[in-house]
Image (cartoon, rainbow, N blue to C red):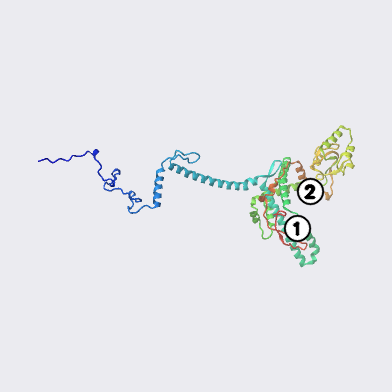
Amino acid sequence: MSKPSTPTKASPSKTKNTAPPNAKRTVTSRGNTPSRPLTNAKNTATQRGDTPSRPLTNAERHARRYGRQNGFFVGRRDNRPVIFNYGRNLSAAQKDRIQRRLFWAFAVICAVAVIGVAAFGWLNFNVIQPGQAIETVNGVPIQQRMYRYMVAYLTQDNYNQLQGDQTQTANLNAELAKDPSKSATIQPQLTTLQAQIQALNTSFTQTQVDQLAIDRLTEDVLIQHGITQLTAQDPGLAATFAVSSTDVNNALTTFKQAFPSGETYATFLSKNNLTNANMQDIFRINLRRAKMDAYEQSLVTSPTKQVDVQRIQFDNLQNAQNDLAKLQSGKVKWEDIVKSDSIDVNSRDKNGDLGYFALGQQDQGLEAYAFAPDRKVGDMSGIVKETSGLFDIARIVGIDNARPLDAATVSSLKSNALSHWLTGERGLAKISTPNQDMYNSPYNIPVIPTYPAASTSTGSTGASVPLGTSTLP
């Protein structure tokens, strides 16, 4: 009887895969349960934990595909720069942080730039431009802001005068209508008012206002310089030229009271972008001018010192120098040169004699020579330059320290005392050419109510006319 054979255990390394060729492979190599085979079905989500029976949509496939890619590249270097070849060695996450920081930095820079431009525009319009010099007088700048203040003041002051004259005209006409017997008294007043209205309404143009404003500011610099010189020579004159706060407030009150009915000082300031302090500066200028005028008028007295002068007048410096050399050499006589070379037709036939004159009656350059403290009869000058630009050779033939003046001459000299003094100061000063662009700048155009048309002789005001560049704006 034969012995049953014992089955031999095969070595694992020699075990053959006896599974049928078409059998489904299991995923034991991935740690899955050996009994669950992989399926070949497409678009199922068993690997992702979804319900096996529902296939993925195109959107889900797209999101998962690129989601995996994004997740894969977040920490990976792609050798692409962030900006200007910087950041090639950084990961995507690091680049993302840098890009966000750059974005916010750029946004902040843009915001700061916008604010800076706006701030500079405000600073330029309110500080830089107003502080620029529209003119210089002996090196002293006249700021554009002061020019603007003066233009606004002069315009409003003229308007107030015009309205006041028209109101007064209407009142006089009403009084005359009630009582015609007053015609002899009222009619001359109406004639005077009509002339004033006509002058204010037709000849006070924008160009005249501009020129008057710059003249007032230029002359104020000269007046301040003159006050400094006079008070240095005589400290007691300081009180004469002092402008107090009371003086300023009184002048300001008078200006406010001159506004027509329905218009106010506050509205004037608001429309012209002015402050009360700005107007106080203008009234200090006006008051200094008034005090210098009063001082110059006080110097006009009778009797007063007068000098008799003979002169030879030239329009060319070289001719004056040539004739002066001849006179000094003694080769020619005064009488011969004055007849042949002097351009002053009024005096050359009188040996150049101007007669006796007081301060204020001749050119300031000639007066400065003739009224010098050490001047004596017989003196002959060198070349004297007049403020008019002409040249003189002068000699003193008489001095009278107490020569009378007639009343008409005194009155005329008083009324012209300040302008005469200022003309002489202008001749000695270095004044730059005003900036014409600032003249026409909209920044300097005042805003005031509509100008009324000129009234007729009967006092009717007529229709209002708009303000423009030909008349006051």
State yes or no: discs 1 and 2 in contact (Cβ < 8 Å).
no
Secondary element under disc 2, as helix, strand or loop, is loop
Most foreground residue, 429 or 51: 51
Q: Position of residue 448 (x, y in %)?
A: 68, 56
Residue 298 appears in the picture as rendered: no
Q: Position of residue 96 (x, y in %)?
A: 45, 44
**Residue 235 shown left or right of residue 372 in the figure:** left
What's the amino acid at mark 2? Asn
Q: Quadrant of residue 141?
A: top right
Secondary element under disc 1, as helix, strand or loop, is helix
Between disc 1 and disc 2, the foreground one is 1
How dense is the environment of label 1, judged by Cα within 10 Å: few (below 14), some, or many (20 and up)?
many
Determine the residue located farthest toward the left in the rendered image. Answer: 1
Q: Quadrant of the C terminus?
A: bottom right
**Residue 393 shown left or right of residue 276 in the figure:** right
Name which residue lies at 76% across and 45% down: 422
Question: In the rendered image, which residue does mark 2 sit on?
Answer: 416
Q: Position of residue 454 (x, y in %)?
A: 75, 59
Question: Which comes before the other along the chain, label 1 or label 2?
Answer: 1
What's the amino acid at mark 1? Ile
Most foreground residue, 287 or 154: 154
Q: Quadrant of the N terminus?
A: top left
Residue 324 position (above or below residue 57): above
The dot on residue 175 is none
**Residue 204 shown left or right of residue 354 in the figure:** left
State the separation of the CA atoms marked 1 and 2: 24 Å
Name which residue lies at 44% across and 41% down: 94
**Residue 96 shown left or right of residue 192 in the figure:** left
Determine the residue located farthest toward the bottom in the rendered image. Answer: 178
The dot on residue 197 is 1
Determine the residue located farthest toward the front in the rendered image. Answer: 1
Q: Position of residue 349 (x, y in %)?
A: 90, 42
